[in-house]
Image (cartoon, helix red, strand yellow):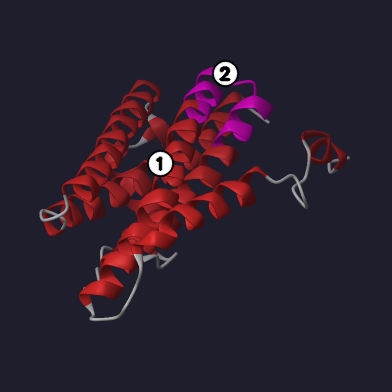
Amino acid sequence: MSTKETQAAIASYVTDMLALEEHIQKALTGQIEDAKDDTMLQDSLRATERMCEAHIATLSALADRREIAGQGLATSVKKAAASVMGLGAAAIDMVRTQSVPKNLRDDYTALSLACIGYVMLHTVGKSLSDEEVARIAQQHLEDHATCVMTFHNIIPVAVVQQLQADGLPASASVLEEVGETIQRVWRSESGVPQTEDVAAHRVV
């Protein structure tokens, strides 16, 4: 495969991630205003929005330097956005509900999508010997993984608050137990493939 074809393949993954980051960032901007009565939630959303903005700047600079796909960056991202929008998560298509927990659930879905997207981009960079792309993907993956864990903590709180606002006898005393359960599940090695298992599925 020629260098041109290799760069085109990398470019398609880069623009997909740029489109996804832009849509997540836009959705978060609207939700920050909605969360003005909850300082802790608003701060978490704002931190996630800033992360997305930093990622967008990094990916845009990368795309500009490489003149991705031999065409304007905006055109490339527009094409990628059409694919991203088809995934349907509310945090991506910016269709927000009146329920804060459900909005956060959709944010979590989009952040998880970003995580696996960066796993793919990192793999692309490594497999095609593009260390710059692999490094950027790894850093962005780490950032999104941290945000996913943050959402593990804030979503249960939002659920209890919503139930209480609806007049239901929801007890906030369960939140510590819920948090411990989440940590235990994610730390458990039961049923989680080990690193060597990934190599076992190598392409022949």
Is 128 rendered above or below residue 24?
Answer: above
User: Split into 4 quadrants, where in the image is the N terminus?
Assistant: top right
Residue 39 on image: x %, y %: 16, 47
Distance between the Cα atoms at labels 1 and 2? Answer: 24 Å
Q: Is residue 72 left or right of residue 124?
A: left
The structure residue drawn at horizontal position 26% and vertical position 63%, both measured from the top left corner, is 94
- Foreground: 36 or 172? 172
Name the residue that disc number 1 marks.
147
Residue 140 on image: x %, y %: 45, 32
Q: Is residue 137 left or right of residue 6?
A: left
| Residue 9 picture quarter | top right
- Point out the frontmost of discs 1 and 2: 1
Sequence-wise, which precedes: disc 1 or disc 2? 2
Q: Is residue 135 magenta?
A: yes
Q: Is residue 140 left or right of residue 49?
A: right
- Foreground: 71 or 25? 25
Labelled disc at residue 139: none
Q: Is residue 21 visible in this depiction of the protein?
A: yes
